[in-house]
Amino acid sequence: MSKRTASTESEQERKKKKAESGAAAAASASSAHSTPLPVLAAKASSLHYLTGFGCHHESEALPDALPVGQNSPQVCPYGLFAEQLSGTSFTTPRHENQRSWLYRIRPSVGHPPFTAVASASSSSSSSPSLASELVVGDFSNAHISPTQYRWKPFPMPGSDSNGKSGSAASASASASASSATVDFVQGLASLAGHGSPDSKSGLAIHVYTCNTSMVDKSFVNSDGDFLIVPQHGTLHVRTEFGMMVVSPGHICVVQRGMHMSIGVEGASRGYICEVYNGHFRLPELGPIGANALANPRDFQQPTAAFEDRKTNFTVVQKYIGKFFTYTRPYSPYDVVAWHGNYVPYMYDLNKFCPLGAVRFDHIDPSIFTVLTCPGPDVGVASADFVIFPPRWAVQEHTFRPPYYHRNVMSEFMGNICGKYEAKPDGFMPGGASLHSCMAAHGPDAATFKAATTELQKPVRLPDDSLAFMFETAYMLKLTDYALKIAQPDEDYWKVWEPIQSQFDPNWKKTNTNSSK
Ligand SMILES: [Fe+2]
């Protein structure tokens, strides 16, 4: 009896506090009209994140904003609209099904019809186009070549590869050739890809270079998920689910259909892998066991934040590779609460737990897979995101750099910082390389010589070096931007030219040259 009474009193007290906090929150919500969300987070460390990978999370910016026990009540708390965002088909098996419920001030549908984004050249005004003209969404007619390619750092807006101003090679060249300010959507440029979003098959690899925040402007991608790898400059990524601050050394994934606005602190550059089908997941670990590589607890999701703000807000939506736009009178960042497992996320690459050979041989780079987007065949990825992190190299009697090889998969690499072990010179931070299906590649001549003559002892690959690879089963095609504007290094093939035959027909096995 006493326990029950105590419990009842406690419940009454809880309900009273809940009502009081609800009233305060309602007043706060009302005052939010005049408090827009900041374009840049004041302090990255002040943001709160949820943790885990593929979890069903929930987040409320106001207390009790989430309906209890159901997704779509007759009337939602605070008069919000319930809206589902589906990341998989309704009938996708439960273990792969992804969706979220968003509780927002106005439904997303409240907007005028889309119009095609006008190109800078066709626009009657002198203002730059809302979006880049260098984005490709259909690679059927793109350039094909089995050649090995390497690109110098992709120029920042208004500068050439040497950092000088006035170059036409900027990623933003077509979108705003005469503009000094370029935002994320204007600064996108496609390098390579396969397939097309209309069949939900294939992928695209882009770079972005920008120097201006998206203000009262959002980007929505109907075509696939963006895995964003910042190389220079911190990104303040606002989404309907909340904000993430993503610095070089971190990555984020913003999935298909989500509004996002990118704020920048200055000149910014990075890489994007866009997958037209499926979603990234953690790779299987097999005999490794339950831990290591990217641990689920280290992935971070934003928490709900909203604004109820009247403004002329421009939405740019990519649909089958083309950009469309509308303007609506309210911010789309009006989601007061959400729950589900279709949520953008970020990850600190420094938390990756690398494994490697502890006795001999160079292990296949798949051991460094952070995320994978599976293809239709088991073990064959549409896209793997692989990093080459700081670590120890300890192998004995081993050629330690990446071995020479020809790969059935295609390998696009970027350098976030430092020197990559197989090519310490020439593969520069902010640049890239592409070794397509069966394109032979491997260490340059100097690296080969050093690796075959070094005294082998444990070596620490430095903390300030970090390269990555987008590896794909698709055979990649190249864009005009990749071949004509960004201009690949024509002399790349020469890094292997000095390699001489080491063949000695009189070689005899001895105790000193045997491998073990
Ligand atoms: Fe390779």
Image (spheres, rainbow, N blue to C red):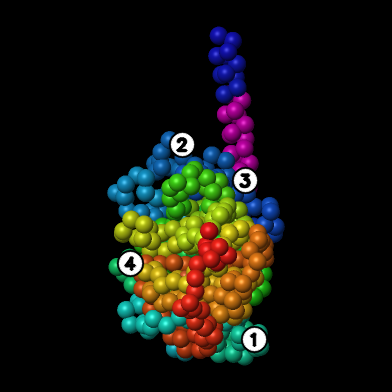
SS category of the residue bearing label 1: loop
SS category of the residue bearing label 3: helix
- Could you tell me how far apart the alpha carbons at marks 2 and 3 are, in whole angstroms? 22 Å
In front of the other: 455 or 506: 506
Mark 2 highlights which residue? 68
Mark 3 highlights which residue? 27
Q: What's the residue type where badge 2 is placed?
A: Val
- Marks 4/2 in contact by CB < 8 Å: the verdict is no
- Earlier residue among tags 2 and 3: 3
Question: Which mark lies nearer to you, 4 or 3?
Answer: 4
Question: Which mark lies nearer to you, 2 or 3?
Answer: 2
In front of the other: 472 or 61: 472
Residue in the image at 59% along x and 90% along y: 167
- Could you tell me how far apart the alpha carbons at marks 4 and 2 are, in whole angstroms? 38 Å
- Disc 1 residue lies near ligand 1 with CB under 8 A: no
Q: What's the residue type where badge 3 is placed?
A: Ala
Part of the protein shown in magenta = 12-28
**Mark 1: few, some, or many residues within 10 Å (few <14, many ≥20)?**
few
